[in-house]
């Protein structure tokens, strides 16, 4: 794991067919933030159920996209996976080892393997550190990753890899534009040669014409270094572009998971359908023949989610069963026996709907 | 290098209603900002027109001058450092840059209103929304407090806020983002203005809420026959609400066209680059065709065509000669020397 | 295929692009001549995406890795404000240590017959009400005043930043405890506190006064330090450091301290002047330093009594000018250091 970027193996070709082994497995992840009252003697009066029972796996070399609206818990998932927060319950296994129970030295070692790219390129870089110090900081924290004499060369290589001029090591973040700063953030994330990169809205703060540059860069790096990505975003178009598999979150739960084409071409959960139908497409002709589902109301508070199915308060299919029984995330029993619509969907009435996404 | 040609006659691509004067006619607007490091020309000879009942989308990235244009039209430019240094803003036939400050103020709010991106900071946090809405009627129409409250509730119902009567006494932070944006819209609508300028009205909202708010805005616009200027960076949002689109780059309009034409066959390489670079929901592409490079600094806009350092089809002439806004077919205009080739190319594809 | 180096400026010397909605943003490019110059020697970045990343050239000779502190020092050495204030402070320190270098007389040997006499050869600043040489007293007073000012400020800044910083960084119980303590000390009026605390002590030295000022002064800095630590802590770069596995010490020293120190520096340097004046006021009230200790503060309050300075303005003018100049020097130093630590201002 300590080989320099320049010594990396030849870029991996297209991922071999068939699923590769799972490198990360999350089981029943729960994260509740207690709500307290009182100044001196604090008592708990409830909890914000930011993540409430989420399971997924990430395979080597693939991109798992997680989409959802604000407050659905997708950013909390990112913090749990990168050990920035400890889960209330549940487990995260990295290559079979439960990382939520690690402490001290073992956790620090783990951090070398799971890195994060942040949303806001303006606050995620320390304005009082030079670019060289920012990208080189991982080596200061993990001295075993690179011998001291090597570090400067490594930093310059990393800048080169992300498409920045290596001569910029002595500049400060404010001298760069948003897109360039995001490249610096990516270089920092790559420094320790992690196997997994968790990217939380990595392009949503960037200008439209620059977003594509960063997305392309991330795709190239994935091939070059055989990275696995968890790509979290609210922009469904970007997630479709970059992801192999996609999970849709609503109020702390995954409501539908599947491959990119299963989710985007054959969504069966009403929330996924509504979400997809609301995304505008930059093509008036395609837009014209589309089924639009406009949802009523807002997302309920995660401190007090609805009983049964959490989406029922905004769902046009909801009935009594939805209020009583929580639908599990399973392949629906009804419907066709084969085909792309057969993927896990947490709805009692999961069913395909036509013309959600323009053909 | 003479690029500003005042009164160059009827502007290409300024709408169809040639027989009547448009509701808003901006001509050759220039706005400069004084900074520590020199003068930045944020808006550099921008002309456009908006008819009653028409939606004009102004599309651009950060620094393109789209928001500054809106602020100049609205008369809320932060000055200093900003300053309108030239051009005319004809609203209903009168040049707003020449009228008295008092007259300008009377236009603002009553005949021309603005919707901001961040509704939470645009609303007063310590006054109930009912009071804030009612104040519009008290101040501009001299309504009594009771009448103003009733009008406020009516407005909240108009923008489809559930249980409006009960919620009029609530404070802005008690509403969700989408509901706050509705309140902003209600406030803009209060005095039934002829023109609404919406600056990134849905950027801060989630997709499902964004759809609700855009639908509402479109419905209200056709109901009141207002002119609407929609300022945005999102090519998707405007596709099914705008009538015409003006694309801005480095302080200038580089292309304007009816919405269908622009998406079908863009006549400027920048527009084309933008359309090609965004991933689409309905397509799983292999590789995005990113526009290379970065938008220029307004302190040092490249000479010639300002897009030439990033343009995939750049030719020697682009380095020196600044392209005027060429008429490029019915109701269209493009600031590219080679717009014709670009269009022919696209037709051939 | 993938683009390789799309954002590197194509030509050397081209300024870094500034983007942002308001064109008022500070442009880059200034102060980067070194980097730009070096970039001119660099090879064009590889353009073949299929090739493995090319090993970048070894750093150009003579170029070294820079850090915030080395850049700040580099900046300060060229800043005239810093040079002037530093020279002034150096001078003050020298005469505090060895007043005999420039004033050979004894500040305590006074001749009442020369009371309030104006300036004369050999006695450039004239005489005060007691007939003491004002020049000699100003020079000898520097030691007390500068000691009180500098030591009290250092003590207040150290105690305040540590306590406030800990409260801001750790939050929770630490914060609740320290914040309440801050409130309590903040509530004590400094004059009343001085009368009570200092009158209880028997013999008062300079250090008693310094200790008293630190005891009542730290909450001012603690509040500011706590606030700026909290706001620095919320930035994503702190989270990023944690994601890399950084410990608390590294986060405090590398990430939070440099970003939270500016308001503390400014407040502390302004407070320095008030501490020198406070010592004078306490002495005037009879709870500060007692004669024969010579201090500017004591001389200023003596001179202000009984309107003597109307007839002999020099007895007030010179010690007051010395005090103002000292305060000004420290404020200028603080400003220069703060600016040097902000890369955006370079």
Image: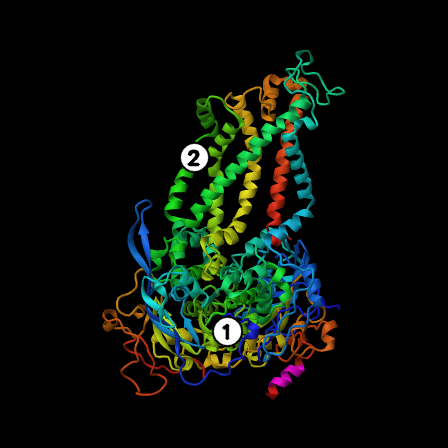
The mark tally for this picture is: 2
Residue C299: image location, x then y, percent: 61, 22
Q: How is the image coloured?
A: rainbow
Residue B213: image location, x then y, percent: 44, 67
In the image, B300 versus C113, the foreground residue is: C113
Residue linked to disc 2: C185
The dot on residue A153 is: none
Kindly identify the residue that appears in the image at 44 percent across and 47 percent down.
C168
Q: Is residue B18 visible?
A: no
In the image, B229 versus A334, the foreground residue is: A334
Magenta span includes B341 = yes
Q: Is residue C67 shown above or below A313?
A: above
Q: Which residues are magenta?
A: B340-346
Q: Residues within 10 Å of mark 2 (few under 14, many from 20)?
A: some
Q: Residue furthest top?
A: C113
Residue B98 location, quadrant: bottom right
Residue linked to disc 1: B236
For the N terminus of chain B, the image quarter is bottom right
Residue C233: image location, x then y, percent: 47, 53
Kindly identify the residue that appears in the image at 75 percent across and 21 percent down.
C122
Lateral position of residue C198 relative to residue C121, left or right: left
Lateral position of residue C86 relative to residue A60, left or right: right
Which chain does the residue under circle 1 lie in? Answer: B
């Amino acid at each position: 794991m300590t080989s320099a970027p320049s010594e990396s193996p030849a870029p991996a070709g297209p991922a071999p067919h068939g699923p590769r082994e799972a490198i990360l497995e999350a089981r029943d992840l729960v994260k509740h933030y207690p709500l307290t009252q009182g100044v001196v003697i604090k008592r708990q009066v409830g909890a914000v159920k930011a993540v409430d029972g989420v399971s997924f796996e990430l395979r080597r070399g693939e991109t798992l996209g997680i989409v959802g609206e604000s407050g659905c818990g997708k950013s909390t998932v990112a913090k749990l996976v990168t050990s920035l927060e400890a889960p209330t319950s549940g487990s995260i296994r990295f290559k079979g080892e439960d990382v939520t129970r690690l402490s001290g030295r073992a956790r620090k070692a783990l951090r070398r393997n799971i890195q994060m790219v942040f949303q806001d390129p303006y606050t995620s870089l320390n304005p009082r550190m030079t670019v060289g110090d920012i990208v080189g900081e991982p080596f200061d924290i993990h001295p075993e990753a690179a011998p001291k004499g090597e570090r400067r060369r490594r930093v310059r290589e990393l800048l080169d890899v992300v498409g920045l001029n290596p001569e910029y090591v002595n500049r400060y973040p404010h001298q760069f534009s948003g897109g360039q700063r995001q490249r610096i953030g990516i270089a920092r994330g790559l420094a320790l040669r992690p196997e997994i990169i968790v990217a939380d809205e990595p392009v949503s703060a960037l200008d439209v014409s620059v977003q594509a540059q960063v997305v392309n860069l991330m795709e190239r790096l994935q091939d070059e270094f055989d990275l696995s990505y968890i790509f979290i975003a609210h922009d469904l178009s970007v997630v479709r572009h970059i992801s192999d598999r996609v999970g849709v979150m609503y109020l702390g739960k995954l409501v539908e998971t599947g491959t990119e084409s299963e989710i985007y071409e054959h969504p069966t959960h009403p929330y996924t359908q509504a979400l997809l139908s609301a995304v505008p497409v930059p093509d008036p002709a395609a837009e014209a023949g589309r089924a639009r589902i406009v949802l009523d109301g807002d997302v309920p508070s995660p401190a007090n989610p609805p009983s049964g199915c959490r989406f029922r308060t905004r769902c046009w299919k909801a009935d009594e069963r939805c209020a009583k029984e929580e639908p599990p995330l399973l392949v629906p029993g009804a419907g066709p026996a084969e085909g792309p619509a057969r993927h896990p969907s947490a709805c009692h009435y999961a069913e395909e709907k036509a013309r959600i996404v323009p053909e | 290098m003479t690029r500003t040609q005042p009164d160059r006659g009827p502007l290409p691509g300024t709408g169809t209603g040639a027989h009547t004067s448009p509701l808003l006619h901006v001509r050759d607007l220039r706005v400069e900002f004084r900074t520590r490091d020199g003068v930045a020309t944020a808006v550099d000879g921008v002309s456009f027109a908006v008819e009653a009942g028409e939606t004009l989308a102004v599309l651009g990235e950060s620094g393109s001058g789209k928001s500054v244009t809106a602020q100049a039209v609205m008369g809320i430019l932060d000055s200093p450092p900003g300053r309108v240094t030239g051009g005319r803003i004809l609203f209903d036939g009168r040049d707003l840059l020449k009228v008295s400050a008092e007259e300008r103020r009377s236009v603002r709010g009553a005949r021309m209103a603005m919707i901001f991106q961040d509704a939470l900071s645009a609303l007063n946090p310590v006054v109930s929304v009912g009071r804030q809405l009612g104040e519009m009627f008290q101040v501009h129409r001299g309504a009594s407090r009771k009448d103003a409250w009733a009008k406020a509730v009516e407005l909240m119902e108009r923008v489809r806020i559930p249980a409006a009567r009960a919620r009029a006494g609530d404070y802005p932070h008690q509403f969700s983002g989408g509901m706050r944006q509705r309140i902003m819209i209600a406030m803009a609508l209060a005095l039934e203005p002829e023109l609404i300028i919406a600056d990134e009205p849905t950027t801060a909202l989630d997709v499902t809420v964004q759809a609700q708010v855009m639908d509402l805005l479109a419905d209200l616009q056709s109901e009141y026959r207002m002119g609407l200027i929609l300022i945005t960076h999102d090519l998707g949002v405007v596709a099914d609400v705008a009538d015409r689109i003006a694309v801005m780059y480095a302080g200038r309009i580089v292309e304007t066209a009816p919405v269908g034409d622009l998406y079908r066959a863009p006549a400027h390489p920048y527009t084309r680059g933008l359309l090609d670079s965004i991933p689409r929901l309905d397509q799983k592409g292999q590789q995005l065709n990113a526009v290379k490079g970065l938008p220029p600094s307004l302190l040092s806009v490249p000479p010639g065509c300002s897009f030439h350092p990033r343009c995939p089809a750049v030719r020697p002439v682009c380095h020196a000669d600044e392209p005027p806004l060429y008429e490029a077919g019915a109701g269209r205009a493009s600031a590219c020397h080679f717009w014709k080739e670009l269009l022919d190319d696209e037709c051939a594809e | 295929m993938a683009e390789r180096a799309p954002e590197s400026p194509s030509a050397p010397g081209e300024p870094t692009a500034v983007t942002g909605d308001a064109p008022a943003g500070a442009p880059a490019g200034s102060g980067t001549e070194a980097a730009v110059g070096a970039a001119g020697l660099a090879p064009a970045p590889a353009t073949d995406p299929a090739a493995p990343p090319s090993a970048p050239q070894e750093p150009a000779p003579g170029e070294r890795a820079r850090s915030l502190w080395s850049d700040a020092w580099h900046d300060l050495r060229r800043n005239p404000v810093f040079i002037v204030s530093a020279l002034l402070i150096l001078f003050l320190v020298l005469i505090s240590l060895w007043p005999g270098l420039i004033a050979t007389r004894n500040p305590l040997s006074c001749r009442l017959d020369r009371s309030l006499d104006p300036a004369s050869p050999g006695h450039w600043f004239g005489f005060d009400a007691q007939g003491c040489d004002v020049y000699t007293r100003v020079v000898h007073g520097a030691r007390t005043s500068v000691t009180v000012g500098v030591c009290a400020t250092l003590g207040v800044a150290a105690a305040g930043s540590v306590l406030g910083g800990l409260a801001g960084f750790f939050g929770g119980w630490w914060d609740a405890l320290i914040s309440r303590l801050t409130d309590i000390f903040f509530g004590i009026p400094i004059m009343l506190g001085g009368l009570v605390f200092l009158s209880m002590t028997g013999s008062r030295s300079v250090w008693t006064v310094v200790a008293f000022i630190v005891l009542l002064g730290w909450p001012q800095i603690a509040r500011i330090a706590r606030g700026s630590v909290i706001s620095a802590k919320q930035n994503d770069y702190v989270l990023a450091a944690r994601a890399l596995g950084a410990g608390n010490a590294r986060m405090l020293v590398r990430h939070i301290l440099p970003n939270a120190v500016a308001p503390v520096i400014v407040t502390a340097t302004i407070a320095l002047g008030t501490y020198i004046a406070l010592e004078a006021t306490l002495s005037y009230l009879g709870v500060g330093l007692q004669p024969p200790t010579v201090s500017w503060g004591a001389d200023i309050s003596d001179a202000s009594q009984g309107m003597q300075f109307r007839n002999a303005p020099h007895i007030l003018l010179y010690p007051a000018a010395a005090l103002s100049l000292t305060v000004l020097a420290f404020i200028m130093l603080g400003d220069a250091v703060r600016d040097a630590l902000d890369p955006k201002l370079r």
